[in-house]
Amino acid sequence: MATWQCVKQCGACCHLDPAERPDLDEYLLPDEMELYLSMVGEGGWCINFDKDSRECRIYPDRPRFCRVESEIFLDMYGIEPEELDDFAIDCCRQQIEGVYGDRSLEMLRFDQAVGF
């Protein structure tokens, strides 16, 4: 059974381009949408993503929509806690593929980390 986990120095989820996420208004509250859009920088990357270290500069204080936690996913997406691993893995794989490609080092590292 695969278990979701974040893989350091990936950053695929930090590619926030709203053009690639047309359903944002379906799960972000109006104030979250405003914050999200304010975080989109050059090339669609989050302004808090350090491209050199490939890490989030505000990780401990990141917004709710940047967190993979069962209560948040239940509230935002209606995902039950027992479904979180599969849902989060699918989301990450789609995002990694879109940003880096399905045969990228990031995808290989992610698949290995989650036991996929």
Image: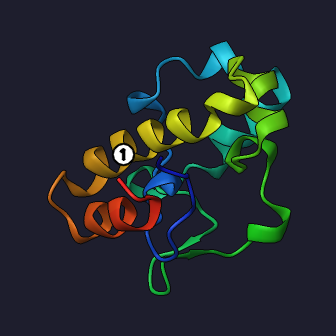
Q: Is residue 104 visible?
A: yes
Residue 99 located left or right of residue 10: left
Above or below, 9 against 107 in this view is below
- The residue carrying pointer 1 sits among few (fewer than 14), some (14 to 19) or many (20 or more) residues within 10 Å by Cα, namely some
| Disc 1 secondary structure class | helix
**Residue annotated with mark 1:** 93
Residue at 35%, 66% (x, y): give it: 112
- Comparing 57 with 81, the one in front is 81
Residue at 45%, 77% (x, y): give it: 51
Question: Residue 92, position in %: x, y?
Answer: 44, 46
Question: Residue 100, position in %: x, y?
Answer: 25, 58
Residue at 19%, 64% (x, y): give it: 104
Question: Residue 77, position in %: x, y?
Answer: 68, 21
Residue 20 located left or right of residue 50: left
Residue 30 located left or right of residue 43: right
Q: Quadrant of residue 37?
A: top right
List the single residue furthest toward the front: 1
Q: Quadrant of residue 35?
A: top right
Question: Residue 3, position in %: x, y?
Answer: 54, 52
Above or below, 31 against 63 in this view is above
Residue type, mark 1 in image: Arg
- Comparing 61 with 113, the one in front is 113
List the single residue furthest toward the bottom: 53
